[in-house]
Image (cartoon, rainbow, N blue to C red):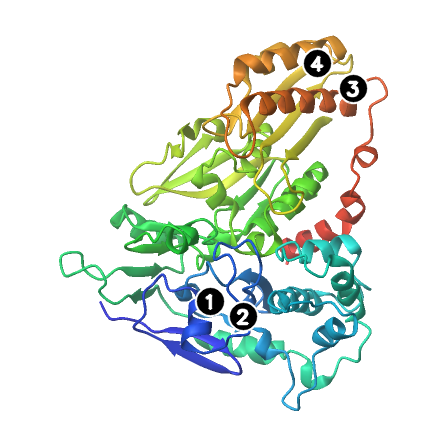
Amino acid sequence: MTTQTIRFYHQGAVREVAGIPATRTVLQHLREDLHCTGTKEGCAEGDCGACTVVVGELDARGALALKAVNACIQFLPTLDGKALFTVEDLRAADGTLHPVQQAMVDCHASQCGFCTPGFVMSMWALYENQPADAGLPTRDEINAALSGNLCRCTGYRPIVDASQKMFDYPHYPRMTLDREAIAKQLLNLRRADTFEYVAPDTRGAAFGSPTFHAPLTLDAFATLRAAHPDARLLAGSTDVGLWVTKQFRDLGDILYIGNVAELKTIERDAQTLTIGAAVTLEDAYAALAADNPELAELWTRFASLPIRNAGTLGGNVANGSPIGDSMPALLALGAEVVLRHGAATRTLPLDAFYLGYQKTALASGEFVAALRVPRPAGTLRFRTYKVAKRYDQDISAVCAALALRLDDDGTIEHARIAFGGMAATPKRAAQTEAVLTGASWNESTARQAMNALVADYQPLTDMRASSAYRLKVARNLLWRFHLETRVDAPLALLDVNAFGFEAAMPAMTDAVVGKEAS
């Protein structure tokens, strides 16, 4: 096999890289190879945001799409055919600061300065992606854009002030990103066939050199997966990246899903929303929330924007983590998972996909191709709740999703209750659902269902929460669900959400629906 070089656009030119490990991170390449040390290393696990960069790639329309991501957990071969922007790109040749940088200076929004380049790149992505006719971003939109930058040494107020003030400065022509010219560069970098990068031999002759496979079509991906069932599947690298940076694991051959256009589609018909396995979490949640606005808060609280820009819904589901926040909501909504092996496909209910702790029903050589989620029909009473020690970018102690459908008399026709963090897998509450189904949705039924949760879950005690705390929280969330959805004087969703995300929902969902339509 002939090694192909990694090609990407950076600082006005196309760079070609070869002879490096396939798991060398973008951050390592920037700092150690290119000596672009403006991008900092903090946690090396995608949490702190000091390493935030912006990656540009061609969307389905051929336009340049910009997304802030964490450089510390992204492998360099995933940059092939894309553009990379760092804090060094912002300042003009004559030394004039970009409006984003000038606003940080004028608002005194930096203290020690270590975290500042990461904040600046998150702000620059917001600046470049803000439509000219959309006005200034709201406080909630700014907070969402900065959710992946955790430093608090200055406090967020001056940084938020700078995020608003940066739009007040003149937008100098020489600082305007020439998206069309860069898009043409990326178009020239497009591969005609599978990109395969053979890494240097680091494991000895007996093992051979690991290969980074990046097919462009679904058929090619399925063929490669069947031929290499032991290859490590890689999507957004938000989990697998930590296996390298924190656990120092040898991944062997890698099969990358991120270049398969057919797996990056979102489709709707009257009954079903179908989300391809390579759709990012940000786009997947936007599509889900367009049908189910109750998901708005969980959407914004799932990790951070840079993680949601890189990670995929298919990867989150396939990972099978017991504390994965996507799965309880998908279970409550009755989602199905589409699996493929070679040319054959099969569909499983999501609640039949998980067999044990991080063990799934995937056969050798099989992979998750898509998620199919029923669209709302009739009056569905649906809520999701996340309980964690920190509001932004934290792992759940308990994540709950509850869905009921009532008839005209207030009798529960259908109940789906699911929790994360309460068992070895994301799990439905079968005993609780049995208590609810066929009963009237009233206080007595709600309290019986709360008691039934004891039979459904025996949660563990760990650093995030004790078993008793988790069970009490789960019971209380079910009671809150009753208060919000009861037949007699229910509480409106906006009345119980202190953060006002629903007010921003039309703008968020209109954007993604427009993108799907195009």
At x 74% / y 20%, what residue is drawn?
482
- Residue 492 visible (yes or no): yes
Q: Are marks 4 and 3 in contact (CB under 8 Å)?
A: yes
Q: Which residue is mark 2?
A: 39
Along the polypeptide, which appears first: circle 1 or circle 3?
A: 1
Q: Are marks 1 and 2 in contact (CB under 8 Å)?
A: yes
Residue type beneath disc 3: Arg
**Is residue 335 toward the left or the right of residue 217 in the image?**
right
Gap between marks 1 and 2 measured at Cα: 7 Å
Along the polypeptide, which appears first: circle 3 or circle 2?
A: 2
Question: Which label lies toward us, 4 or 3?
Answer: 4
Along the polypeptide, which appears first: circle 4 or circle 3?
A: 4
Q: In this rendering, is residue 140 above or below 173?
A: above
Q: Which residue is mark 1?
A: 27
Residue type beneath disc 4: Ala
Residue 496 in percent (x, y) is at 80, 33
